Amino acid sequence: MSTVPVVSVIMPVYNGEKYIQKAIESVLIQKVDFELIIIDDCSTDRTGDIIARFAGNRSDIIVLKNEKNLGAAATRNRGIQKARGEYIAFLDADDWWMPKKLERQLALLKKTGLVLCSTARELMTSDGRPTGKIIHVKRRLTYHNLLYHNSINCSSVVVKREVILEFPMGYEDSHEDYITWLKILRKYGASCAIDEPLLKYRLSAGSKSGNKLKSAKMTYKAYRYMGFGYVKSTLCFISYAVHGVFKYQFGRRSLPDKFRRKK
C-alpha cells in the first residue's frame, strides 16, 4: 500500500462464518480512506474461506492469523500494532455499521478536538433482526459519567491511534474495553458521540455481555483493576446495575425528540 490510510479498522474474529460477511461489507461501503485488519483467532469453521474471498488482491484488507487462541483483548492489540492509520476503529465480526459512520465520526472528532468518538447502537437479535431497542449515548461523555455507566460500545469507537497505543486492552477476564475507555477519559477528559444508531449490535448468549451475571462480575472486576477500593467499586457497580436495567428494558425504538436533528 503506497498511501497511509486515515482509519485502520480492527476486526477480531473467532468462528464467525455466520456473521462476518455482513461486518466486512459494512466496512467496505464507508466513504473514507481505510484499511481493514482482520485477525483470525484460530477459527475452526469457514471463517478463513470467507475472509479470503473478500481479501483477494485487495491491498486495503490485511489478514492476520493467530498461532494460538489469544482472546479478544490480545487479538485487538495485535491488530493495533499492525495498523498505520491516524485513527483506529473497532468492529466485532458479529456487528455491522451503517453507511457514513466513519465519515461522520471523523468530522466530529476534528470539530471537537477530542480523541475518542462513539455512537448509539440498535440492539439486534442473534439472527440480525431488530429488537426495537436503541441504546443512546451522551454527546459529550466525561470520565465521571463513564465511571458509573459504560455507554461506550467497542464496535462503535473511533479513537486516535497514538492514544489507544498508550492504553492497550488487557484483563481478558473482565470488560477489557471498558477499562481502556476509563483510562483514556481519565487522562484526556472527555469523549464525543453521535446519538444515532450507526452501529447494529447483535445480541448473543455466547458473548461476554450475553450472560448478565457473568457480565456483572466482570464489571466489578473492571473497577478493581482500575485500582478502586471495595467501597468505591461497590458504589460504581450499583450505579452500573441500575443503568443496565434501564438500558436493556427501556431502550427506545426511535430517537426521542430532544435528540433529533434540527431541520
Image (tube, rainbow, N blue to C red):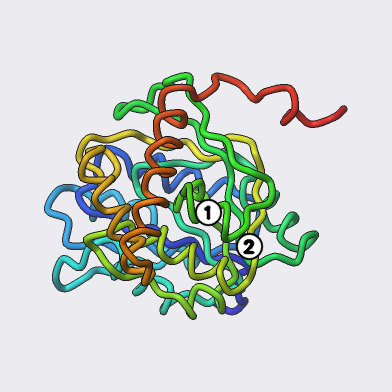
Q: Which residue is drawn at 22% across and 35% down?
A: 205
- Of the image marks 1 and 2, the number of the one nearer the N terminus: 2
Amino acid type of disc 1?
Leu
**Quarter of the image containing the C terminus?**
top right
Judging depth in this view, the residue of 49 and 215 nearest the camera is 215
Task: Left or right? Give the position of 147 relative to 47.
Answer: right
In the image, residue 252 above or below residue 95: above
Q: Which residue is drawn at 21% across and 40% down?
A: 213
Q: Mark 1 points at which residue?
A: 146
Query: Dot 1 lies on which element?
Result: helix
Residue 191, given in percent of the width and then of the height, sits at 64, 59
Residue 127, given in percent of the width and then of the height, sits at 31, 26
Q: Which mark is residue 263?
A: none
Label 1 vs label 2: CA separation?
30 Å
Residue 91, given in percent of the width and then of the height, sits at 43, 52
Q: Which mark is residue 33?
A: 2
Residue with the most extreme front position: 231
